[in-house]
Image: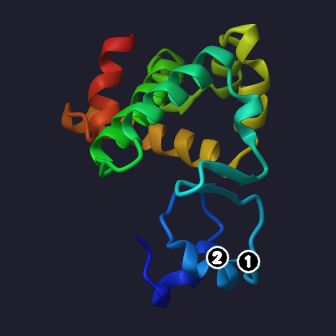
Amino acid sequence: MLPKSLLDYVCSPVPFVVGVLSIYRKIIDTMPMEEVVYVDLDHDKIIGEDDRKTFPESDKKYMEKNLKTIIQKGKPIVKEQVAEAFLEFFLKNFGDYRKFMKNKEFDSAGFIKSRAKASKKFYDVFQNSQMYERWTFDRQEVHQQEKDNGTSTDAFEAKSLHYQ
């Protein structure tokens, strides 16, 4: 949970997920932010732009099912389970990225073109996001690091080796 003293961090121009107590909502609403989606776990509501419409239907159902299983009323949320659910989503959709590494560069156009037509809207939106830009940059660095050191650096990289 983000403490009140760090609420200004929600204005950072980077994609992130952060937990904030609902008592701070009025303060947060006065801050200069764009493209914010609130997920009110206490009231089971999503407020703001709901980008779930861009998700491929099968992925959306899978994620919702997993997250509902993890987030059950009255039970503590295990952050590792939430992280694993998102990791599985990213692996399913991006795990084969190594096929598109060409001479230390990520072939973004080839990657997007290779995706299923049912997922086109998601990838069209995602490829124009700061998160995608950062992800492709990081993949290029990791790819070079793996060539230099021969090791994977994180859970996504280690598990994505199985998607080749």
As drawn, 15 above or below 59: below
- The residue at which mark 2 appears reads as 25
Is residue 156 left or right of 55 when viewed as pictured? Answer: left
Mark 2: amino acid? Arg
Where does the N terminus fall, quadrant-wise?
Answer: bottom left
As drawn, 99 above or below 32: above
Number of marks present in the image shown: 2
- The residue at which mark 1 appears reads as 29
Along the line of sight, which residue is nearer the eye, 68 or 134?
68
| Residue displayed at 65% across by 75% down | 11
Whole-percent x and y of residue 36? 71, 60
Mark 1: amino acid? Asp
Q: Residues within 10 Å of mark 1 (few under 14, many from 20)?
A: few
Q: Are marks 2 and 1 in contact (CB under 8 Å)?
A: yes
| Residue displayed at 75% across by 44% down | 50
As drawn, 40 above or below 158: below
Whole-percent x and y of residue 100? 54, 19
Is residue 98 left or right of 131 when viewed as pictured? Answer: left
| Residue displayed at 47% across by 45% down | 138
Helix, strand or loop at disc 2? Answer: helix
Whole-percent x and y of residue 40? 59, 57
Along the line of sight, which residue is nearer the eye, 151 or 124?
124
Whole-percent x and y of residue 124? 78, 29
Does residue 127 appear in this view?
A: no
Q: Residues within 10 Å of mark 2 (few under 14, many from 20)?
A: few
